[in-house]
Image: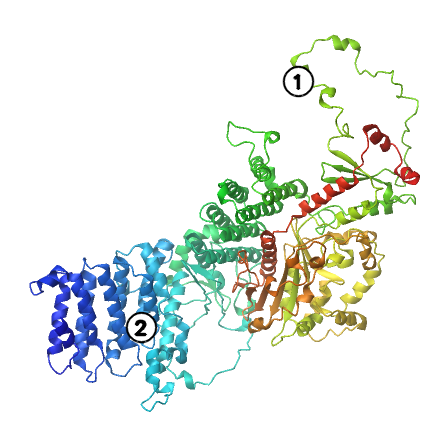
Amino acid sequence: MEVICYGLTLPLDGDTVKYCVDVYTDWIMALVLPKDSIPLPVSKEPNLYVQSILKHLQNLFVPRQEQGSSQIRLCLQVLRAIQKLARESSIMARETWEVLLLFLLQINDILLAPPTVQGGIAENLAEKLIGVLFEVWLLACTRCFPTPPYWKTAKEMVANWRHHPAVVEQWSKVICALTSRLLRFTYGPSFPPFKVPDEDANLIPPEMDNECVAQTWFRFLHMLSNPVDLSNPAIISSTPKFQEQFLSVSGMPQELSQYPCLKHLPQIFFRAMRGISCLVDAFLGISRPRSDSAPPTPVNRLSMPQSTAVNTTPPHNRRHRAVTVNKATMKTTAVVLEGKFSNDDSSSYDKPITFLSLKLRLVNILIGALQTETDPNNTQMILGAMLNIVQDSALLEAIGCQMEMGGGENNLKSHSRTNSGISSASGGSTEPTTPDSERPAQALLRDYALNTDSAAGLLIRSIHLVTQRLNSQWRQDMSISLAALELLSGLAKVKVMVDLGDRKRAISSVCSYIVYQCSRPAPLHSRDLHSMIVAAFQCLCVWLTEHPDMLDEKDCLKEVLEIVELGISGSKSKNSEQEVKYKGDKEPNPASMRVKDAAEATLTCIMQLLGAFPSPSGPASPCSLVNETTLIKYSRLPTINKHSFRYFVLDNSVILAMLEQPLGNEQKPRPVPKNDVGFKYSVKHRPFPEEVDKIPFVKADLSIPDLHEIVTEEEPANSRLPPHLVALDSTIPGFFDDIGYLDLLPCRPFDTVFIFYMKPGQKTNQEILKNLESSRNVQPHFLEFLLSLGWSVDVGRHPGWTGHVSTSWSINSCDDGEGSEQDEVTSSEDVGASIFNGQKKVLYYADALTEIAFVVPSPVESLTDSLESNISDQDSDSNMDLMPGILKQPPLTLELVPNHTDNLNSSQRLSPSSRMKKLPQGRPVPPLGPETRVSVVWVERYDDIENFPLSDLMTEISTGVETTANSSTSLRSTTLEKEVPVIFIHPLNTGLFRIKIQGATGKFNMVIPLVDGMIVSRRALGFLVRQTVINICRRKRLESDSYSPPHVRRKQKITDIVNRYRNKQLEPEFYTALFQEVGLKNCSS
C-alpha cells in the first residue's frame, strides 16, 4: 500500500497512476460487497484499510503542472467510487465515516480554496466535488451524525470556496430540500407544501428522521456563513489561499480586479439571495416558480460608481408597495424576514400582495414557532410579536382598514373568510387570485381562518396556546414565565370582545401557575421563584381590573380567593373534599413576605378597585379627594379647624377622620345627656324579669357564653369598644405632620418616562432639548405618538404623579382661575411638545394598578421666553395645527381613560404657588424609592443612536425620588448610565417604526412586547411603548431588594401612627369623650 500511495504522486504521462486508482477503487468496495480480487487482510478488516486508502487517495487531487483530462477522469472515478461506498455500505464504522468526511473536505479545500484558474481542474470538478461532499455528508447525518468539530470545520472551509458558483448552487438545492421536509412535519400536511425537484428531494435520505432533519437543516443553513459577504470582494479575497496568490513573483501585491473569479461574485450573490428568497416564501406558504427570474449582468463591483440618489417619491405613491415583515422565529433559529413583496406586472404568476394577504401566514409562523421553540430568547421574541400583532389587529378593526396601495383611495373590505382569497388591484378593482397562488392560501385559510382571521380569534388562540405552555413547558423557566405573564397582561388590555370561557381560562391558568410554584419543594424556593409568583399575582390583578365582571361568576371568585388565601397564609383552607382547615386554626406560613404582600395587594384590588375605577375623582386618584381641608372649607363656620376632627383607626389599617359639626344647614340640636340619670349604683338594670333566671338552660343556651366569661378584668383599656377600634389623640405634637406624610404615600406604583427628539447629526444635549420648542422642528407622527401615550394634565391641579415628587399628589386645589387665562395664551402659541416639561403641564396615564408621567424635558429659559413673547407665527407648516390642539382635544388613541378631574370645581384645585405648603413641615418627603426612569428617544436617523448623549442628559431625568430620605443609594443622583433603559424609535419610509432597546441589563433584561429590532405599526406604537414601560418598571421592582408595595408602606405608616398617637383611655372615658366637643378639650388644654 505504501507503494501504491507513492504511485499516486507520479506524473500522469503513463498508466501507473491509473493502475493505482483502479486498485484502490476496487479495494474500498470491501465495505460494500467482498470480492475475490480483494486481499484477505483487507476483507477481514475493511474499515481499517479503507481509512488508510482514503488518506492515500488525497495525493491524486493535488494540482499538477501537466493538468489535463486524464487527472480529471481519474478524480471522477474516485468520486463515483466514494458515492457508491457511502450509499451502499452498511458496515462502515464511525471512524471510517469521519475519515471519509475529512477526505472530502480536504480534497475540496485543495482544489476550491485557491482563486479559480480558467479551464483548470478545479473549474471542471467543482460541481462534482461539492455535490459528492454534500451528498455523503447528508448520508453521514443519517447513519452517524457528525460531531460539532466536523460541522465547524466544514463551515470554515465552505466559506473559503464561495467564489465558485457551484458551491452556492449546491447549497441552495440542499437547503431547499431540507426545508421541504422540515415544513412537512413542523406545520402539518395542511400547510402549503414547498415543492422541490425530485432530483433535489432525493438528496435527503428517506430514512432521516424528523429530529435529524431539523438539526441538519439548522446547521446547513449556517454553513454558507453570511451570504451578504458575497457582495464584498474584499471579504471573499481575504482567505489564506487568496492571500498567497496576491503576492506576485516579485513580491508586489496584485489588484483584486485581476482575478476573473471575483468578477462573478454579483451573479453568485444573486443566486444565494434567490435561494434564501425561496426559503422565505416557503415559510410564508408561497410557492412560486422562478423561471421568470434572471441573474443580473455580471459587473465589476470595484469599479462601479457609488450612487447617492435617493427616491423622493412619497411611499404611498410608489407603484411597488414595499411591505416590511416582522421578525419570525423558525424552529431553533430566529430568521429575520425583512423581505419586500411587490407587484410584478411582467409575471403571469404574481398578483398584488399586501401585508393583509400575508397576515395569516405570519400568524401561522408565530404560532407554529411558539409550539416548537426551545430557546428562551427566541421564545420571548415570539411572545412580544404575538402581542404586537394582536393589538395591531384590534386597532385595525376598530378604526377600519384602508388599502395599502393606490394612495389609499380605495377601501379594502374586511379581511374575513368570505373574501380572504381576493386581493385588491392597484386600479381599484378586485379579482380572484390565480389558481396557482390560490391553492396554498385557501388550504391555509381552511385550517386557520376560523381562529385567526380576526382580532378576537387571534386573542383567543394566543390565550389558549400561552396558558397551556405556561403550565407545562415554561413554568420552570423564569425568563419565559415572566414574558408569558407579560403577554397575558397585555392581552387582557386588548379591546375586543372575548367569550367568558376564554377569559376564565386565562384567570384559571394563572391561578394554577401560582399553585404549582407555591407547592414546589422547599429546597427549590428562591428569590427568583418568588419573583415569578409575584409576577403571576400582578398578572391576575390586571385581568381582574380589566374584566371585573369575571368575579360575578361564583366558581371564578372562589378560585381567585383561594389563591389569595394561599399567598397570604401559605395553604388553602380546603385541600381536598374531606379535609377543611379554618383560617383561624392555620399557622401563617407564606412562601415569602414578598408573596404575601402580592397576595394582599390582589385582595386589596378585589375589595377596593373592582367596579370602582375610575372613581368620581378621575383616574388620577383611586380614592376620594375629600379630606379635612375640604370639609373645613365647606363648613362655613369660623370656629372649625383641623383640631375639630376626631380620629380613629379600624383594624390597624383604616384611619377615620370624623367631623361632628353643623355644616351650616338647619339642624335640630342633638339631645344633651342629663346629669341626674344613671349614676346611682343601687339601680340594677335588668332587661328581663327575675323569673327568667329560674328557667332551666337548654343546650342552645349553653352554646352562647356569658359576657363575663369573655371579658376579663386584665383586658387593656378600650376593651369593650367596638372590635379593633382605636382612638387617636390629635393633640400630640407631630400628629398632623404624620397625617400629611401619609397623604404623600402613593396608593399605586408610579413610573416616569422622559421623551427626547433627536435630529440627524446631533450629539449634544442642548441641541436635542431645543428640538421640541416648536412643532415645526419635529415630524407630525411624533406629535401623534406623543398624544397616544397619555392625556394632558395641569401640574398645579393634578392629584396624581407628575414626574417630580415636589409637585405630585396635590389633593387640595384652590385655583382662583388665574391659570386659565395663561392656558389660553399658551394654547394659541406654538410652544411645541416642550409644554409637557413638567412645569405647567405633563402627559399622564393611569389605570387601576399604575400611573405614569410622560415628561418632555426642555430648556427652562427657552420655554419661559416663548410664553412671554406671544409669538403666533403659524403659517409655515401643517404641524402648527397639532400642538395648540393638544391642550383642547382628547387623545387620539381608543383606550385612554378620559380625564374626569377637569370636571372638578376650581375651588378644589391647588395653585402652583401653594403647592409646597402641602409638604409636611419639619419632616422630609417620604422615601419613595427605588424607582425606574425610562427614556424614549425618537431618532430621525438610525445611525445616530450610538451618539445619543445619555450621560449628559442624566440631569434632565430627575424625579426627586432619588434624593428623598432613606432612598436606595443605588438610585440617587449618581445613577449609572447603563441602569437607565432607553427605547429608541426610528420612523421608516414605509410608515412603520423600528425599535431599538438598550440599557436593560441583568437577568430581567428582555422585556416584552417591544424587543430589539422589532418593526411596529403607527397605530400600535403608543400602546406597545406604554406597555413596555410598565413591564420594564415592574421587572425593576421585582429585581430590587428594597422595594415595598404601596399598600405595605401605607400600612406600616398607619401602624406607626397608631403606636405613636394611640389614646390610652379607659372605656368610660372613651364614651364620655364622644359626647364632648373636641374644641372644648383643646381650649382647656
Q: Quadrant of the N terminus?
A: bottom left
Which of pointers 2 and 1 lies earlier in the amino acid sequence? 2
Q: Using the image as rendered, state which of residue 457 and residue 667 is in the foreground.
A: 667
Q: Residues within 10 Å of mark 2 (few under 14, many from 20)?
A: many
Amino acid type at image mark 2: Val
What residue type is disc 1 on? Ser
**Label 1's element?**
loop
Residue drawn at the location 53% of the way across and 78% of the way down: 311
* Closest to the observer, 141 or 318: 141
Q: Nearer the viewer, residue 777 or 196?
A: 777
Q: Which mark is drawn over residue 167?
A: 2
Q: Nearer the viewer, residue 25 or 614?
A: 25
In the picture of the structure, the residue carrying the numbered disc 1 is 703
Give left or right: position of 477 versus 653. Answer: left
x and y percentages locating residue 390 in the rendered image = 53, 55
Alpha-carbon span between mark 2 and mark 1: 94 Å
Give me the residue at 34% from left, 65% from top.
220
Q: Residue furthest left?
A: 36
**Rendering coords of residue 927 (x, y %):** 71, 53
